[in-house]
Image (tube, rainbow, N blue to C red):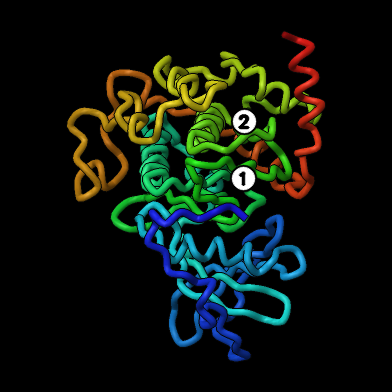
Amino acid sequence: MLEILNILPVVDVLQRTSVWKKTKEKKHELCSLLCRGRFSVTKRCDQRGSKRTIAAKHVNKKLLRREQVLQEIRLLQTLDHPNLVKLLDTYETANSYVLVLEMADQGRFLDYIVSWGNLTEEKVALYLRDILEALRYLHRWQIAHLDVKVNRHSFILLHLFISLTLSILASLTDFGDAAQLNPHSSYIHPLLGSPEFCAPELVLGQPASLMSDLWSLGVVTYVLLSGASPFLDESLEETCLNICHLDFSFPEDYFQGVSPAARDFVCLLLRGEPERRPPAASCLQEPWLRPPPGAPGRDGGYGALRHAPPSPSHRGVHLDTSRLIAFIERRKHQNDVRPVGAMKAFLQSRLLNLT
């Protein structure tokens, strides 16, 4: 297991016997199944004695060791940021470790976008700023999320969820793959399932980096702007090769009406060398991501309502979300359990043959 540094003021849940509450008391009424992940099932529940709706993540004891689940809890208990999902409680059943998490009022990220429509570059930039704020906070503590993606067939809310406060707020969730990186040693992240959001260094079995999250955000940006996946091919091997070769483009029929600034932002993140990708704090200063002139912050006015006046550029042009529906359906049926690390030798040999 990855060494956890002392720079994060964590509560040592590994030493706390009370982290798992063994109780037969029925605390929650099951409402519906939210999703099935690689190692867990997440259910939408109502708390007994209150009207509060929560998300209960049931991690199968046969699929994950107790220590692996405790690592996710350790992070959730100590992190505190409005753009990160909050852990409310934990308990243990005969077959599962259960993480009780706050529930989003507006549901899954892509479902929200498709159902409401009227997606513009300006709104995409607003959601990306939320996620970048979360990443900036995590990276300050040398924590890499390592699973930033938009996906309907995953834990709770696509790893991005919408919560209704004064405005629509996008937040990161699912810290099952997160790791606190040690600058004095390397961490090789075990890769499972589809690699289409993964950075080249992860696909090649090289050390993970905080900048691996920025690559993934670049893929997310591409998907939101076009409804298509930049590197996806007919086979897992070809998809991985496309990632390693940086083989992506901006087909005009997919990117009609998308500004050059938005495309440049994608290219800024989809750089092969991790050190050439800008950190989250720098991304937040990019002109394309900054609020348009005259738009107040979240406390009121246009910023709080998420309807700032469009600038004279492309930012107010509606984006075509029809392809996102097909993207959601494809990802819903995709198997995310297969290990892809075995392809490392194949990829390296193919890359050597092309040099």
Residue 187 location in percent, x, y? 59, 43
Near mark 1 (Cα within 10 A), the count class, few <14, some 14-19 or many ≥20, is: many
Is 70 in front, or is 155? Answer: 70
**Where 211 falls versus 67 (above or below)?**
above
> Is residue 90 something that shows in the picture?
yes
Near mark 2 (Cα within 10 A), the count class, few <14, some 14-19 or many ≥20, is: some
Q: Nearer the viewer, mark 1 or mark 2?
A: 2
**SS of the residue at dot 2?**
helix
Q: Image point 67% across, 51% down: which residue?
A: 153
Name the residue furthest front. Answer: 184
Residue 300 location in percent, x, y? 19, 48
Identify the residue under disc 1. Answer: 151
Name the residue furthest top. Answer: 355
Image-based side of 130 in relation to 15, left or right: left
**Where 326 falls versus 261 (above or below)?**
below
**SS of the residue at dot 1?**
loop
Q: How many marks?
A: 2
Q: In the picture, which quadrant includes the C terminus?
A: top right
Identify the residue under disc 2. Answer: 201
Residue 302 location in percent, x, y? 24, 41
Is 287 in front, or is 163? Answer: 287
Q: Quadrant of residue 147?
A: top right
Q: Quadrant of residue 315?
A: top left
Q: Quadrant of residue 331?
A: top right
Q: Image point 56% across, 70% down: which residue?
A: 99
Query: The disc labelled 1 sits on which kind of residue?
Result: Asn
> Is residue 112 something that shows in the picture?
no
**Where 88 falls versus 343 (above or below)?**
below
Distance from disc 1 to disc 2, alpha carbons, whole Å, reads 21 Å
Image-based side of 98 in relation to 123, left or right: right
Q: Image point 54% across, 50% down: which residue?
A: 179
Q: In the picture, which quadrant includes the N terminus?
A: bottom right
